[in-house]
Image (cartoon, rainbow, N blue to C red):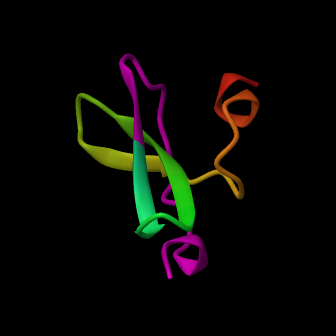
Amino acid sequence: MVHDLPDPPVAAVRVLAVDGFALRRGRRYATALIDAVTHRRVVVPPDGKAATPAA
């Protein structure tokens, strides 16, 4: 359901936070990039791999 939400328009992000969470405990995980100042979701990458947010 999280991936189906539209990404909000994003201004310049000064502080970026990375949050990992379980969609289904022990089976599916996801990562969200959050603007740490406004607490708004910037993007939810399609996979939970560490290289995706780094890019």
| In the rendered image, the vertical position of residue 27 relative to residue 45, given as above or below | below
Q: Nearer the viewer, residue 1 or 11?
A: 1
Q: Residue at x 53, y 58 (%)?
A: 29
Q: Which residues are magenta?
A: 1-19
Point out residue 26 in the picture as x, y percentages from the top left corner. 47, 64
In magenta segment, residue 9: yes
The answer to which image quadrant residue 49 occupies is: top right
Q: Residue at x 52, y 76 (%)?
A: 5
Q: Residue at x 75, y 28 (%)?
A: 51
Point out residue 37 in the picture as x, y percentages from the top left corner. 23, 28
Name the residue at the top extreme.
Answer: 14
Q: Nearer the viewer, residue 17 or 28?
A: 28
Describe residue 50's horizontal placement relative to residue 27 as left or right.
Answer: right
Describe residue 5's horizontal placement relative to residue 48 as left or right.
Answer: left
Quadrant of the drawing holding the C terminus? top right
Q: Residue at x 71, y 58 (%)?
A: 46
Point out residue 10 in the picture as x, y percentages from the top left corner. 49, 43
Task: Please identify the dominant SS of the magenta region.
Answer: loop
| In the rendered image, the vertical position of residue 26 relative to residue 50, given as above or below | below
